């Protein structure tokens, strides 16, 4: 069982400016909750017991969000707002939260390296703080990844999802040894390949299980043209050294919602709002009216 997760949330989120000028993109709301709350809820459902957030400047609202707020709780109690109090149930999660800072935003690989002491000698999960898996964070893929990690004695397991072949240029794409069921070995990874150069249409979906071996790989790779240390390069190094890197496909009907750019943020917000148990039906009518141009 994997019990620890590193959630990197230190990126600048430049693609979502000005919304992210003074607040983390991971705290932007999707329907009722901030994005990062969905991520935490998914991890807890999958048995994660301790989470390290790798944060940066202007990210303190993430710590505040997961902290207990006794003053707010007292005020809600006093005014009998029990329904609102229950919306804050997540504060009672038994998960332990830890925080560390990435001082300079030198890429995802560097952010993960900030979790080396936290991970210690054990395998751990990395979950991107700007990606929700499954509608309302319903995904169990992380549990499946942990099973594959142990069964195959892997050094790394990556969650992947099928993307339209013409869109491979937006994603990190894996090269499978051969496709066989929902889990298979990866022999290479390519960052944002043009469709004609892509070895598959299977894109890295924001969840990784690693053995602590990855930290050495991260230290050994060079920064890219933009000065960022890319985790895909470190995983490539694992492949080159003959270590077993596996991929697990998201099950059919399960999607990765990447909130890092406006088109997919808008789409995710609308899809989650439509699924809202209280307001979804009325919102659908509003949307239909707007689309009909009235
Ligand atoms: P992105 O690649 O979307 O990076 O990071 P970004 O820098 O936030 O976004 P843009 O390109 O400027 O719009 C994926 C995840 O990795 C984290 C981000 O916070 C996000 O959750 N990250 C990225 C870090 O923690 N540190 C970094 O140096 C880069």
Image (cartoon, rainbow, N blue to C red):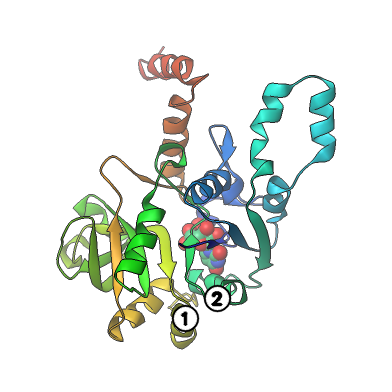
Of callouts 1 and 2, the N-terminal one:
2
Query: Taking 154 as reference, is 85 above or below it?
Result: above
Q: Is residue 236 left or right of residue 177?
A: right
The circle on residue 218 is 1
SS state under label 1 = helix
Q: Is residue 210 left or right of residue 193?
A: right
Q: Position of residue 277 (x, y in %)?
A: 49, 22
Q: Is residue 106 visible?
A: no
Q: Is 100 or 139 nearer to us in this picture?
A: 139
The circle on residue 113 is 2
**Picture residue at 48% right of the left edge, 28% below the top:** 273
* Marks 1 and 2 close (CB-CB < 8 Å): yes
- Per the model, the C-alpha gap separating discs 1 and 2 is 7 Å
Crowding around mark 1 (Cα neighbors within 10 Å: few <14, some 14 to 19, many 20+) is many
* Figure quadrant of residue 119: bottom right
**Picture residue at 50% right of the left edge, 68% below the top:** 108
């Amino acid at each position: 069982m994997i019990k620890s997760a590193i959630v990197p949330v230190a990126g600048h989120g430049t693609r979502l400016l000005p919304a992210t000028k003074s607040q983390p993109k991971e705290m932007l709301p999707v329907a009722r909750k901030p994005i990062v709350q969905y991520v935490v809820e998914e991890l807890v459902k999958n048995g994660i017991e301790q989470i390290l957030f790798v944060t940066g400047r202007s990210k303190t609202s993430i710590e505040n969000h997961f902290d207990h707020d006794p003053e707010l709780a007292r005020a809600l109690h006093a005014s009998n707002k029990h329904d609102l109090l229950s919306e804050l149930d997540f504060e009672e999660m038994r998960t332990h939260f830890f925080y560390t800072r990435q001082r300079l935003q030198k890429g995802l690989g560097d952010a993960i390296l900030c979790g080396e002491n936290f991970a210690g000698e054990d395998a751990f999960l990395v979950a991107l703080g700007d990606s929700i898996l499954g509608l309302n964070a319903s995904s169990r893929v992380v549990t499946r990844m942990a099973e594959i990690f142990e069964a195959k004695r892997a050094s790394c397991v990556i969650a992947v999802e099928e993307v339209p072949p013409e869109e491979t240029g937006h994603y990190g794409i894996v090269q499978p040894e051969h496709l066989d069921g929902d889990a298979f070995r990866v022999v290479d990874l390519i960052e944002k390949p043009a469709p004609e150069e892509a070895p598959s249409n299977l894109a890295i979906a924001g969840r990784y299980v690693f053995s602590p071996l990855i930290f050495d790989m991260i230290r050994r790779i060079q920064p890219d043209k933009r000065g960022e240390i890319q985790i895909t390069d470190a995983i490539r190094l694992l492949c080159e050294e003959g270590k077993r890197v596996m991929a697990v496909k998201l099950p059919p009907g399960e999607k990765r919602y990447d909130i890092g750019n406006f088109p997919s943020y808008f789409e995710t917000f609308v899809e989650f709002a439509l699924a809202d148990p209280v307001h979804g039906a009325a919102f659908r009518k509003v949307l239909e009216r707007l689309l009909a141009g009235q």
